[in-house]
Image (cartoon, rainbow, N blue to C red):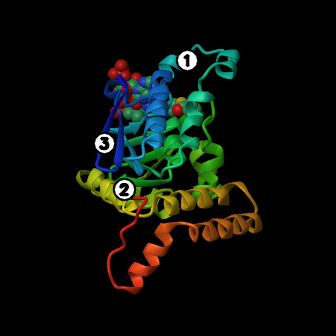
Amino acid sequence: MNFECIIVETKEKVGVITLNRPKALNALNDQLMSELGQALTAFDHDDAIHCIILTGSEKAFAAGADIASMVDYTFMDTYKGNFITRNWETIRTIRKPVIAAVAGYALGGGCELTMMCDFIIAADNAKFGQPEIKLATIPGAGGTQRLPRAISKSKAMDMCLTGRMMDAAEAERAGLVSRIVPLEMLMEEALSAANTIASMSLPAVLMIKESVNRSYETTLAEGVHFERRMFQATFGTEDQKEGMRAFLEKRPAEFKHR
Ligand code: HXC
C-alpha cells in the first residue's frame, strides 16, 4: 500500500505506524485518517503481527484535527461526510493491542486518538490537551467521554473548559499515560512493551483487550460475568496448557499462538 501521510513498518511481530505530516504537526485530515484506518486494518488481519504501535514525531504526535480543512465545513459536511464518522471509528474495531507512543503535542483530535489506543507511553516532552474550546468548538472524537473516565471529571472539565495543556508528569499522575520515558527512549520502550505482548499467547492477549474494554461499556456485574467466560475460554486453548505446564516444569513456555 502506498501512503502519503503515514509511514508503515514492521519490526518482527510489531506493526509500527508513524503519523507523517510534519509541516502541519501531524494535523489529522481525512486522508491521514483514511490511511491510518487502512494500515491498522491490514495489521489486524496480518497473522504475523501481534501488536501495533502508533506514533508521531518528536515535536508532535498530532496537533489535532486539521483546522485548515475544517474551517469552512458546514454542519452537513461534518454530519454526512466521513469526517469523524467512518474514518475515526476504524481504530475502535482493531482487536490487537495498539500502543500510543507519544512525544510532543497530542492536542484535540490528537489527544482523542491517543485515548482510542489501548495504552499510552509518553516521552517526557509530551503535552496533552483538548483546546477545541479556543476555536469555539468542542472535542468531537470522544474527548468529553474518554477523558473523564481516564483522569476524573474534575480534571477533564478543567482541560476541556480552559483548553490548557497537561505535561507528561501531570498526565501520568492523573492516570492518562501508563509510563513516561526520556524522549530518546520512547520507541525503545514502546517496542519493548510491544515485543513483550507479542511473546504472549495471542488468544489471551485478545481476550484481555476485549475484557478490559468491556469495563467501559457495561455494569460491573456484566463485566465480571464476561471476564469469567473469557477466563473459562482460555482453558480451551493449547496455550493455557503449555503456559501452566511450563511454569510447573520450570521452563519457558512455547506458545503456539504467538
Ligand atoms: C492544521 C496545524 C494544526 C492543526 C498546527 N498546525 N496545528 N494545521 N490543523 N490542528 C500547523 C500550523 O498552522 C503551522 O503551519 C504548523 O502546523 C506549525 O504550527 P505552529 O503553530 O507554527 O507551531 P508552534 O508555534 O510550535 O505551536 C504548536 C501548537 C499550535 C501549540 C501545537 O500549532 C497549535 O495550537 N495548534 C492547534 C492546536 C489545536 O487547536 N488543536 C485542536 C484542533 S480541533 P504553517 O503553515 O503556518 O507553518 C480538533 C477537533 C477534533 O482537533 C474533533 C474530532 C475530530
Q: Nearer the viewer, mark 1 or mark 2?
A: 2
Where is residue 162 shown, x and y percent of the image? Answer: 57, 43
**Which residue is at 40% across, 66% downward?**
255
Sequence-wise, the earlier of marks 1 and 3 is 3
Outermost residue to the left: 184
Residue placed most toward the observer, 83 or 200: 200
Q: Which residue is mark 2?
A: 194
Amino acid found under the numbered disc labelled 3: Thr
What secondary structure is found at the residue carrying circle 3?
A: strand
Sequence-wise, the earlier of marks 1 and 2 is 1
**Which residue is at 63% across, 71% downward?**
232
Tell me if I can see residue 134 in this picture.
no
- Which picture quadrant has residue 199? bottom left
Q: Quadrant of ligand 1?
A: top left
Q: Pointers 3 and 2 in contact (CB under 8 A)?
A: no
Sequence-wise, the earlier of marks 3 and 2 is 3
Mark 1 C-beta closer than 8 Å to ligand 1: no
Amino acid found under the numbered disc labelled 2: Ala
Where is residue 150 shown, x and y percent of the image? Answer: 58, 56
Looking at the rendered structure, the number of numbered marks drawn on it comes to: 3
CA gap, disc 3 and disc 2? 12 Å
Residue placed most toward the observer, 176 or 247: 247
What secondary structure is found at the residue carrying circle 2?
A: helix
Residue placed most toward the observer, 181 or 5: 5
Q: Which residue is mark 3?
A: 10
Q: Which residue is mark 1?
A: 71
Left or right for 206, reference 197:
right
CA gap, disc 1 and disc 3? 36 Å
Q: Nearer the viewer, mark 1 or mark 3?
A: 3
Amino acid found under the numbered disc labelled 1: Val
Q: Residues within 10 Å of mark 3 (few under 14, many from 20)?
A: some
